[in-house]
Image: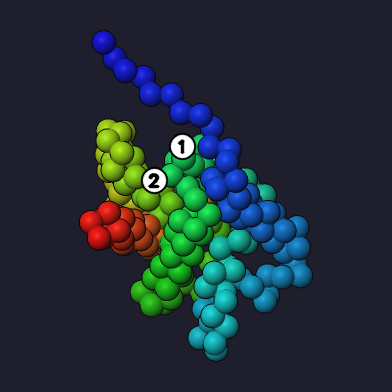
Amino acid sequence: MSLTIKRAWPISVQALLVPALIILLALLAFIFNDQLIDLLVYQRSAITEGQWWRLLSGHFFHTNLNHLLLNLAALIMLWALHGHFYTIKIYSALFLFSALSCSLGLYFFDTSLQQYVGLSGVLHGIFVFGAIMDIKQGDKTGYLLFIGVWLKIAHEQFFGASADVVNLIGANVAVNAHLWGAIGGLIFSVMYLLLCHYRKTS
């Protein structure tokens, strides 16, 4: 006899507020792209000159409408899949940690990359967190998700991104952003679990 676990849609304020805010900021960045991109986009030379806010703000910009819709669809899918784990504090910290991990990883270890846009690196970090939370809750699909995302990243490291995705977004895919974003999500998840364990035992 199989047991099917049914989850309600994660429509609480705690689960919805930050993802909705991210979607709003990404839409505003797209609408006002020409006015904002020179000031806010991840640009290596500007960051070197001290414009550190670009490490975060640059993630909200996209190359074209396809790129924007692809990332927002992934954000919504992850919310539908793992939103029951989200709170305003946890998701905000996860997003910020993954975004900075992605940007700093690119800045220090991918020095040839001069400009980067998109949420995909951060989304990999959010994906990793959700998979680990599934595992923590005893959901075996978490193992499949966790292994799957790292196999995808490894494939990209060796063989590059899909040509279809490159054509869709009209730019090269910064596969190292996926790697550093996922590493950020992994580090955040470990710290979060350790904190939970500490609070439980103290």
Contact (CB < 8 A) between labels 1 and 2?
A: yes
Name the residue that disc number 1 marks: 81
Q: CA distance from mark 1 to mark 2?
A: 8 Å
Work out whether mark 1 precedes mark 2 in sequence or the reverse, and give the earlier one. 1
Quarter of the N terminus within the rendering: top left
For the residue marked with disc 1, what is the amino acid?
Leu
Q: Quadrant of the C terminus?
A: bottom left
In x, y percent, where is residue 139?
30, 34
Residue 61 vertical placement versus 72 (above, below) = below
116, above or below 2, in the image: below
Extreme residue toward the top, this view: 1
Q: Secondary structure at mark 1?
A: helix
Q: Please give the name of the residue rendered at 67% of the width and 76% of the height, measured from the top-left corner.
A: 39
Using the image as rendered, state which of residue 100 and residue 167 is in the foreground. Answer: 100
- Relative to the observer, which residue lies in front, 171 or 177? 177
The three-letter amino acid code for the residue at tag 2 is Gly
The image quadrant of residue 193 is: bottom left
Observer able to see residue 157: no
Residue 46 horizontal side relative to residue 183, left or right = right
What residue is drawn where x is 32% and y is 46%?
132
Residue that numbered label 2 is attached to: 130
